[in-house]
Structures are given as structure tokens and as C-alpha cells.
Amino acid sequence: MANSIAAFTAVLPATAAVPAAARCEAFGSDFYEQGFRDFEPFHELSSWDAQRVRNNCRVQGEACFVVQIKDGKMYVAEEQAGFQSRNHLTMAMLLRVSAKFFPLPDAEFVVDTSDGFSRIEAPLFVIAKFPSSRGGILYPDFSSYAWPESECPSEPFGSHVWSVAYSKLLDTAPPWHQKTEQLFWRGAATSAYRKQLVPQISQLQGANVSVMRWIVGQAGQRQVVSSGEKTCVPIEEWCQHRFLANLPGNTMALALKYRLLCGSVVMTSPLMYHEWYYSQLKDGEHYVALDLSWSSAADALAQLRSERVKLAEGIGARAREWARTHLTDDAFDCYWLHLIRMASQHFPPPQLTPSSRPVEALLAASAAGASAAATAQERRSSLDVIIVIPARAGDEALMDHARNTWLGEVQDSKLSTRHFFVISLRDPDVDGLRRAEDLLVVDCEHGYRQLMQKMAVAYRILLDRFVVRFFIRADVDSVLPLQYLLPLLPHASAGQSLVRVPDVSGCGGSPGHAARWKMPAVGRLQCQIECAMDRGCHFFQVSESGDCATFSHCDPLPSPIVTGGEVYHYRLRTLVGAEALDEANTRQRHPFILGTILRGNEVLVNDSYNPQWNNIRYSHDLGLSVYPPYPEASGYAMSADLAAFLAGVGVGELSTLSWKAWAIEDSALGTILAGLRFDLLQMPTEVRERVRVIRVEKE
């Protein structure tokens, strides 16, 4: 739809700015009443409630974007691609508002371009919602600007630019006495309700209703529809009929605006989902409401068609006059201005980020031929490493120390990095926290037992925002030696950090190559751990029964100390300080975790010295007294696919699953991942010894 975006953005006014009051006060207070009601629950919105709405856009992953207005300039951030051209048409509409009423006040808000919500409590700008919803702020949607995807192939290109359709309907709609007695409707089968109801309505006397089948054409082309009696009918031909059916799709029916302009009687199913202007319309004055099953339709039509009752013509005339004065470009723009002013008054001020882009730049990219999906993917920044650090709002001193020390010591790394401190929105001290670009506030329970849920939500948000290869998880009171740790990650991903050596059975076969450490029946993981902790170890051998021996060298000698088994080269030791691999050398991707791997740790249930480590619920749930191996939370790295696995819980097809409230997140991680195939890698002691725990006192 790149060409359509270019065409529709061309209708932006080139006139000088016009004072808002002169255009907008004439509509009266009733016109803005819905907006006042929508903002009532969100007066003095906290900065973290606003952050939660932005996070909702990121997590949802589609059909939304963040609008930021700063010093009269309009920006868009955090865009998630919407359906067809909805996002960019809405942006073009906002750009027109900005030009008409320059300068707009500083404001920031999130716009959702999906069909709407049955229930919503968030301060999210939405197209439609249940009138009883406690949240959601209704706004004039994209079709109030243009709707190219709804144009019939027989219509000239641009026919559904609203100003064009508005003028044409007012000019060409026939007077009442020239209209047919038919009940008319055309539309797509976008809901089961329409599919069930249309055959029933078609049986009514004088009904001309049918469902069209829309087929997606090639990129840049308008849609192609079925032919015959079910063909697409241009909107000006709708007005030839006295009675127009209005049938909701998934939520509302965006074409109600066109029907009101025809001067015909709109007969509608219950308006369960409301758009921004519905509260200004009255049943029996501007339209006729029927029951959900349309069982009353025959009697209603008979009454409206009766020559003795002059209801119908009056309803059509009042609807047309109301639409003529309230559904104009100025009306849409003035309502948007009202919403922006309210957002400026009640929402936190805008916080521009590196992802904030002028709205003109986004529309120009679309006009140049970039699809919405490709543009969104371009804005989904690529990173090699994201460092995630769970923290409490009261940890500001520790966060400042990390920013000023180890987090800032990676300028020379070949890997691109960013870091985020993860804070729970329900942290009792969150409102007093100083806002910063590296804070990621997530909507989850606050507390030590909720860390797994907190981290999973953080991974989900970050994976939606970035194309990332690796995550590093650190504690807020830890210092990680990133200059040593970062170069190891591409090698681990390429499967080059722990390599099985084929056809070598002669380890330790000479006095100079004696085993450094031996232990029966400990298994491969413990053998690797022992080798990692010994600076002189480069190889280890594990027999079929789990007997372990570690070595400085493994030559193909005839008399092995450990009979049979497998020999592994612990290459992480020699890679410490080496350069990161080039992309060409990392085509094979191995999922991995690299850290201080702990094993055999007891599940504590009665520790009075560290009561936060007591994990009675874990013991009761699994009946275990010892944790499976897990990476110590003070610092470990993992491939992004493992983070994506953790992030999938609670969303999509896994929406019914949730995390248990276990006391220790890192031990829970080992339990959760135990059955997956991935490389569990012990960090070499050369790196591990540089991990430090710090304490920073508050001033």
C-alpha cells in the first residue's frame, strides 16, 4: 500500500496555521463529552502507568505505536505493524492535525489500531470498546482519513479518502422520493455473526444483502472481490436505497459513517462496541436499533414503509444533517486536538528515545515503497547482547554505580550491547524512582518469589523490541568482567567452546601427562566444572560409567588412564581474551548457557540466616531435596532462543500457563530447562574470579 500512502499524505493542507479555538469551539461541549469521560479514570496518570501502556504495545506485538509531541514536533516510537495501512493512515491524520493546529502541546500517548476491545482498563487510545469499559480512550480512526482497502475495483483510486467520499455522498445522494424501498447491505464476512445473520436478513421483503469475498491481490494493488450479485458496490450507490443495514464485524462497523451521510434509514444491530461519536447519536432519531437476532426487523420495516407513518424520511434527514456537521475533517481534527490536550494535561510528558522518529520520516519511507512490515522490522533494532539486571526501585545507588563502572567498559567490544534494569510496576517505591532510558518497567508481581515471572516478561518485551543474539543476566550488586565474557559468546554459540575430540583415548599415557584430577561416577557436567576451575586443565575424559579425569594434554597415546569414554577439549580456557568470531564463522547456532554452574545444592526449607532462600513451595511441588544444575544469577549468559522459550509462557497459545512463585529464580531456571537440549557451559575460573559483589550505601 506504499502508493496509497503517498497519495493520501498529499492531501495535507499547505495553508498557514489556523487558531484552534476558531475551528473547534463551534462544535459545543457535547461533542467532546466522550473524551472527557474516557479520561476520567486517568487524571494525573503516573509515569509508570504510562510505561505499562508502552510495554503493552511492545508485548502485544502488533497494531500500535507511541506518539510523542515535543516542542511542536511529532514523533513515533515503538511501532508494531498494524493491519493493512491503518498505522500509517492514522499517522498521516495526526500529521494533518499537527499542521492545522501548530504548535500542539507536548504529549505522549499510545495508539492502538486494532478493531478494539470488549473490555479494557488501560489508558490506551482505541478505535472501539464496550461502553462499560473502565479504560480505553476512543479516537477518530484511520477510515476518517482514508480507507484504500475498502475501495471497489470499479471506483477511482482515492475514492475512500474521507473528504472525497464525504463530498460525493452529499452531492449525489438522491432525495427520499427517488430512493428504492430496498434494505441494502454489502460487506465482507469478517465475523461469524455476519455469516449467520446475512442469510436470515436476505429473506426479508425487499432485502438486497450479500457477503462479498475479498481476495488479497499483489503488493500495491487494491483488493479483488467476487462478482455477480455479490459484487462490490460503490458507496454512492448505497444511497439509492431507503434502508441500509448496519452489521458489526469483529467489533464495530466502520462504514456506519458513510451510511449516515446517505439520508437513508440506518437499521442496525445493537451497538455493543462504540466508536468515539456513538454517544452523540440517538436511537429513533438518527438510526433504528434492532435486537441482536433481527427478529424485529420485519415489523420495523413494515412500519417504516407505511405511508401513514412519516418516521423514515425524518430519521434519514436528521442522520444526514448530523453527519454533515459532525463528521467533517475539521470535526475529526478538533476531536483529536481535544484528546491531545487532555493527554498533555493528564499524562506524563514525552520522553524521546533513540527509537523516536519524526512522523514525516515514517510516511516518507512508506511512500518510497517500503511496506509496513519491512519498515517495522527495520525499526526493530538489531543487537548482539542485551544485559538484563533485575532491580528494586530502592536500588538507585547500585544502578548508578553499575552505569558508571562495568556497564560503561565495553566501548571497544566488537559486539553491540545495551543494558536494562528491570523494575516491577508494583514495586512500592516505583513512583519515586528517577526515570532513565535504561529502566524497563514490567507489569508483574513484585518480590523475590516472583523473579522468574519478572524476567520472563522482560525477555518478552525486549525480544519484541530488538533482534538479539544473546542475553546476559546479572545482579544489581554484581560486577561482571564484560571484556572477558563478551568474546566467549559467539564461540559458545558456534559450538566451539567445548569440543569433543574424536579418536583420542591416550590421555595420561605418559608420566608427563598424568591426570590432574580423578573421580569415579561423577558424570560429564561435574567433570567439566572441575576442569574449568583448574587453570592447568584443557581436556577431560568421561567413561561410560561417568568416571572422570582431567588433563593438561591429551595425545593419542596407547595407555589411557580412563578406559574408553569420551574426550573433550575445554576450549573456553584458551579463548579467554580472544577476539569475538566474525558473523561468517557463526552460522551454526547452538543454544547455550554460560555461567557458574551450581549442582547438588540443597533445597532449603528452614534457614533462619537467609530466610529468603527457603523454598518450601518448590520442595512441596516437586518433592525434591536437591536442585538440578543451574547457573548462578550473579552473572551468566545465554542464547536468545532460550530466553524466547522462557518468554513464551503466558502468551498466545500458552496464555493459560503461568509461573509458580518459587523462591529462587536461578535454581528454578535449571529446573525448567533441564529437559532441553543445549550446552551447559561452566565459566572458566579466569573469568569467574573477576566477578565481584559490591555494596553501595544510599546517601
Image (tube, helix red, strand yellow):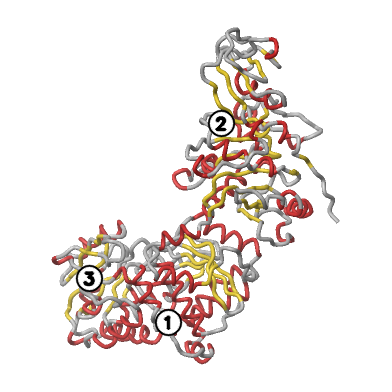
Camera-nearest label, 1 or 3: 1
Residue drawn at point x = 27 percent, y = 63 percent: 188
Above or below, 209 against 243 in this view is: above
Amino acid on which disc 2 is placed? Asp
Viewer-proximal residue, 486 or 202?
Answer: 486
- Residue 690, horizontal then vertical, whole percent: 75, 38
What distance separates the C-alpha of mark 3 from that of mark 2?
A: 56 Å
Q: Which of marks 3 and 2 is nearer the N terminus?
A: 3
Camera-nearest label, 3 or 2: 2
Which mark, by number, is residue 12? 1
Q: Mark 2 points at which residue?
A: 679
What distance separates the C-alpha of mark 1 from that of mark 3?
A: 25 Å
The reply to whether residue 556 is visible in this rendering is yes
The reply to whether residue 117 is visible in this rendering is no
Q: Mark 3 points at which residue?
A: 153
Residue drawn at point x = 42 percent, y = 59 percent: 374
- Residue 257, horizontal then vertical, whole percent: 34, 76
Which mark, by number, is residue 586? none
Q: Badge 1 local density, few (<14 within 10 Å), some, or many (20+)?
A: some
SS under mark 2? strand
Amino acid on which disc 3 is placed? Pro
In the image, 463: left or right of 326?
Answer: right
Query: How many numbered circles does the render carry?
Result: 3
Viewer-proximal residue, 52 or 121?
Answer: 52
